[in-house]
Image: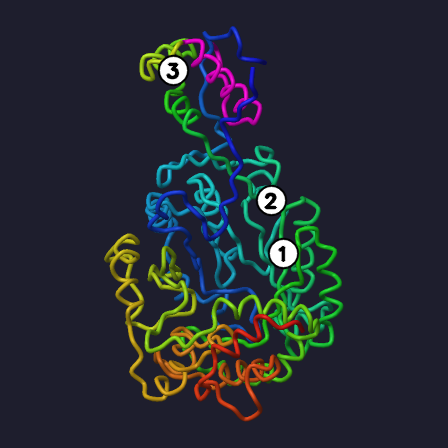
Amino acid sequence: MEVKNRFDVIYTYSDDIVAREIEGELIIIPLVSGIGDMEDELFSLNETGKAIWDKLDGKKSLKEILEILSDEFEAPKGEIEEDVVGFVNELTKRGILVEVSGN
Amino acid sequence: MESKSYVSKVRIDRSPLWKKSAPVLSELDMELTERCNNNCIHCCINLPSDDISAKEKELNTGEIKEILKEAASLGCMSVRLTGGEPLLREDFEEIYLLSRKMGFKVLLFTNATLLTPQLAELFARVPPLEHIEVTMYGMKQKSYESVSRSRGSYESAWNGVKLLTEKGIPFIVKGTVLPPNEDEIEEFIKWTSNIPWMSSHPSLSMFFDLRYRRDKGKNHLIERLRLTPEKGLAILSRDREGYFKSTREFCSKFMSPPGDRLFSCGAGLGKGCVDAYGYFQLCIPLRHPDTVYDLKKGSIKDAVTRFFPEVRELKASNPDYLARCAKCFLKGLCEQCPAKSWTEHGTLDTPVEYLCGIAHTQARYLGLLKENEMSWQVKDWKERIRKFSESIS
């Protein structure tokens, strides 16, 4: 489901991946099959993605994350919102992020 | 809205190119056991599968977990599980899952005889992220089991390969050229061409290593099984054009006299091998006591950042080595290294005649040396390499 207009939802990292930060690079390693298209595919995040990733703790809603990022980067909420929506949509489609159940 | 991607696919092979500095440890070999259920005639490491004293000395699951944890903390991305036969370990599944849950890619070296439907199911569900490497010893029961000296191993190996194929688990196979199977090479290569994950011809072992532990009892047999340099060359150059092409590419990068520094390879540079008992080595074969590090008394970090660099600075003192190997420009064709010197002679700097013969035979065939000429006597080696690199076969 598209995340737009669902900012009360809480997202967290899927149990099907392992995320590791190595030499400043955030690397996402599939744990189960079906995450990547190829058998030896890993993923890395760009800087914007990493900034959003770091705020996903399984407790904060997207609305709270938006507010924190907006303060942190002193950027208009609309701009941040576009990035957060794009990021969450992309990573949920890939099975890297999941909604926290019960919210 | 402009389409923007926040995540990108990355291929981190066993020599990752990091944007900033490389991690302290990039890859780790874990030799889980020296025991094997096969008893291959040419093998350089195997102990009997029921060797209780060897089994008792092996690292336990908890110790392996601690080593893996430290490796992960140092940035290691890839772990090779090897042996002996790693699937012999009763805790293999646990070690495998631990490795994957810590975020490693796992490269498994196996003879596939102990693969079970349960294990294949696990590899399908939690993929290793590296192609499993299976060594096959023959296309027929007689040839296979003449090599493995283990009754039933042929059927078990083929069942293992069948399981991997049915489950779509990526694997490649490697072969050996030995008297019982040397007539089957073409059949073997033809079969491997149907394996979807094989992108090139299989590697074929034929210039076998002597025993890594220098337990000499088996060395006489291994020496007898080694192909002569001429016979090995005939196999390597079956596809003459391909052989020239790959050698030319390699030679343009790796051909120069190494001088008295013993280590010109990448052994111990952000990588290493933990043996079955917790000793950390620069590479799998190198077990000279002066070059191994006891992980029970130290750490991977200390080994990789302090001990290994010290070992890599070692210089040759053997006059024979200094007169020959140090001045030899065939480095890219010769497997002479401290590990080979160790397995053959128990030293780090003794020329290995067998390897020297292989390199010279190839160099003569490639036109880099004249008949009866020895490489260390050649003064115009740079010119010869240049001409060879630019030549068309």
Q: Secondary structure at mark 2?
A: helix
Residue type at numbered disc 1 = Ile
Q: Main secondary structure of the magenta part?
A: helix
Q: Chain of mark 2?
A: B
Mark 1 in CB contact with mark 3 (< 8 angstroms)? no
Q: Secondary structure at mark 3?
A: loop
Mark 2 in CB contact with mark 3 (< 8 angstroms)? no
Foreground mark, 2 or 3, reads 3
Count residues near mark 1 (Cα–Cα under 10 Å), then give few for <14, some for 14-19, many for 20+: many
Residue wearing tag 3: A59
- Residue range (magenta): A77-103
Q: Quadrant of the C terminus of chain B?
A: bottom right
Q: Chain of mark 1?
A: B
Q: Quadrant of the N terminus of chain B?
A: top right
- A89 within the magenta span: yes
For the residues marked 1 and 2, what is the alpha-carbon distance in whole angstroms? Answer: 20 Å
Per the rendering, the mark at residue B172 is 1
- A102 within the magenta span: yes
Per the rendering, the mark at residue B118 is 2
Residue B197 or B259: which is nearer the viewer? B259
Q: Chain of mark 3?
A: A
Residue type at numbered disc 3 = Lys
Mark 1 in CB contact with mark 2 (< 8 angstroms)? no
Per the rendering, the mark at residue A98 is none
Q: Secondary structure at mark 1?
A: strand
Q: Residue at x 62, y 69 (%)?
A: B204
Question: What is the quadrant of residue A10 in the picture?
Answer: top left
- Residue B63 percent location from the top left of the image: 34, 51
For the residues marked 2 and 3, what is the alpha-carbon distance in whole angstroms? Answer: 37 Å
